[in-house]
Image: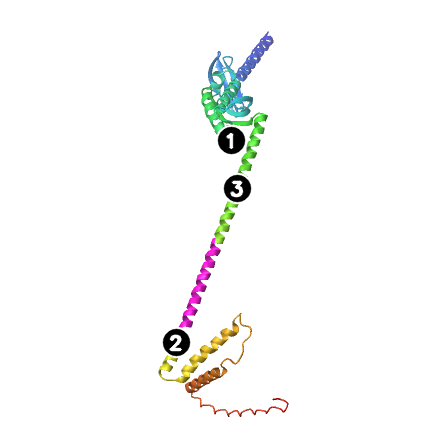
Amino acid sequence: MDGLALDGLSITLIVLGILALLVLFAGAKTVPQGYNYTIERFGKYTRTLKPGLNLIVPFIDGVGKRINVMEQVLDVPHQEVITRDNATVTANGVTFYQILDAAAAAYEVTDLQNAILNLTMTNIRTVMGSMDLDELLSHRDEINERLLRVVDTAVSPWGVKITRIEIKDIDPPKDLVESMGRQMKAEREKRAAILEAEGRRQSAILQAEGAKQAQVLEAEGRKEAAFRDAEARERSAEAEAKATQMVSDAIASGSVQAINYFVANNYIEALGKIATSPNQKVLMLPVEAASVIGSIGGIAEIARETFGTPPAPPAPPVPPRPVRPPSAGQS
């Protein structure tokens, strides 16, 4: 009997041990990193379990929702949007969100992802429909910023943070794309024509400036040459006036040689002009050669008197040439 009682006690202890293990396993909960668990007691939310080992009241508390609190990606499918200028385009996008409050995400909305998706699609139509097509194609950053601000405000009561909303594709209709291509080509041709005309205009301006500078430089050269010619004529006139004054002084003092010098100088210059005239072909000499020789003699006398050279002995008289009598046959 004692052996049977011992066996019954052992069985009881074993059963109690098993029950203790079951209670322990039921009350210990391990939450993986990146998740939060909500705890419900008799169906009512009580608290949220963080990542790691957590203890709950066995058989009374239970795990309600397993919430992923990591950043998640939600694809926004293609949808048609009518712009403000009545152009129909097709757009799609992507939404990044993160759950910050597991309890609110679990109990404030049903099917959180579907709610975020429908809210994003609705606001895409609203934001893009308030813009013209040109603005739609060139202001994606503005569209993304407006969508992020509106959707994030709308999902804030659900304990969700919208981190980014990006529009991936905006596809206009085929005929509209062709029209835009023709418009872009015409605009580029217009810019090319404007640039070409501007180049010709600039070239004409530069050529005119060059011609102007050349004319200015030519005028300055003529001015300088005229100034030099006038200066040369002035100096020549001064020299001639000085020479004339000297001759006048000599004449006033009664020097006949000075008169001869003045007359001979002018006479020789006149002969030189006659000889170099383009209309003069033949010059018959002597032209009052005796007067010229006499004038040159006067010049020589002036030079001897000026430099103190003794006068040269007079040339011997030239004997008269004998005249041959006419022959007998001539009468």
Which dot marks residue 138? 1
Q: Measured along the vertical axis of the image, is residue 249 above or below residue 143?
A: below
**Which mark is first along the chain, 1 or 3?**
1
- Find disc 3 in the rendering and name its residue: 195
The answer, for residue 186, to whether it is visible in the render is yes
* Magenta stretch bounds: 212-241
Disc 1, SS:
helix
Image quadrant holding the N terminus, namely top right
Q: Residue 49: horizontal and vertical position, in percent?
A: 49, 20
Would residue 257 appear left or right of 17 to someone viewing this image?
left
Q: Amino acid at mark 2?
A: Lys
Residue lying at 44% horizontally and 67% vertically, measured from the top left: 229
Front in this rendered view, residue 33 or 210: 210
Q: Residues within 10 Å of mark 1 (few under 14, many from 20)?
A: few
Q: Residues within 10 Å of mark 3 (few under 14, many from 20)?
A: few
Front in this rendered view, residue 202 or 160: 202
- Find disc 2 in the rendering and name its residue: 242
Marks 1 and 2: CB-CB under 8 Å?
A: no
Total marks placed: 3
Q: Residue 186: horizontal and vertical position, in percent?
A: 55, 34
